[in-house]
Amino acid sequence: MDIARYIMIIISAVFINNFILSKFLGLCSFIGVSKETKPAVSMGMAVTFVTTMASIISWLVYNFILIPYKLTYLRTITFILVIASFVQLVEIVIRKISPPLFRAFGIYLPLITVNCAVLGVAVLNSEMFFANGQALPGSFLMSLVQGFSAGVGYTLAMLLMSGIRERLDFVDVPKSLKEVPITFIIAALMSLAFLGFSGFKL
């Protein structure tokens, strides 16, 4: 097992190619749920679960169904169905375990179904860890690690943004910049900060 490669995947997914701050995927839930820390972290955990499980199932489906039967052109719709199934599972569990948290998520929990960050992880795995119609050695574990790390990167971005937005409640922000405008400015500055990680050579 090449530990260095797995470390590279983790660092890349969390910092260098962060799906929110570098690839700008999943911005809808990022802006909508990051007003408070608790819902933001919970959303991050839910997305991490979905990205991890979607990586596992999409790898299995891609490797054992789509490639052998030459159905790779159905990749996108297949991955969307996988993601939608797991989002429904997460929604049912959260509704049962914590109704207040379910209400705090509002419309943004079902939006994980169409969250381009989750789909992006599944598609990226199929592009990075498959070659010439075959899975690369260790590709299953690499897909799993990348799916989990992408969720951790999403959670990190949510946590940072929610902490900043909570502190903004104590700041005299001009009326024209309140809520969404100042949030986009903060997100842009965070993206610039994360851009610094792109200089790392692993």
Image: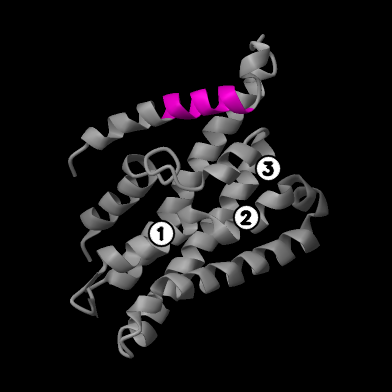
Q: Write down the residue under mark 3.
A: 39
> Considering the numbered disc 3 on the image, is that residue within a helix, a strand or a loop?
helix
The residue shown at (57%, 48%) is 44
> Considering the numbered disc 1 on the image, is that residue within a helix, a strand or a loop?
helix
- Mark nearer the N terminus (1 vs 2): 2
Q: Quadrant of the C terminus?
A: top left
Give percent across and percent down for residue 173: 64, 12
Q: Write down the residue under mark 1.
A: 121
Query: What is the residue that sits farthest to the bottom in this orientation?
Result: 69
Question: Which stretch appears magenta?
Answer: 180-190
Query: In front of the other: label 2 or label 3?
Result: 2
- Mark 1 Cα within 10 Å, few/some/many (few <14, many 20+)? many
Amino acid identity at mark 3: Pro
Q: Write down the residue under mark 2.
A: 111
Amino acid identity at mark 1: Val
The residue shown at (72%, 64%) is 93
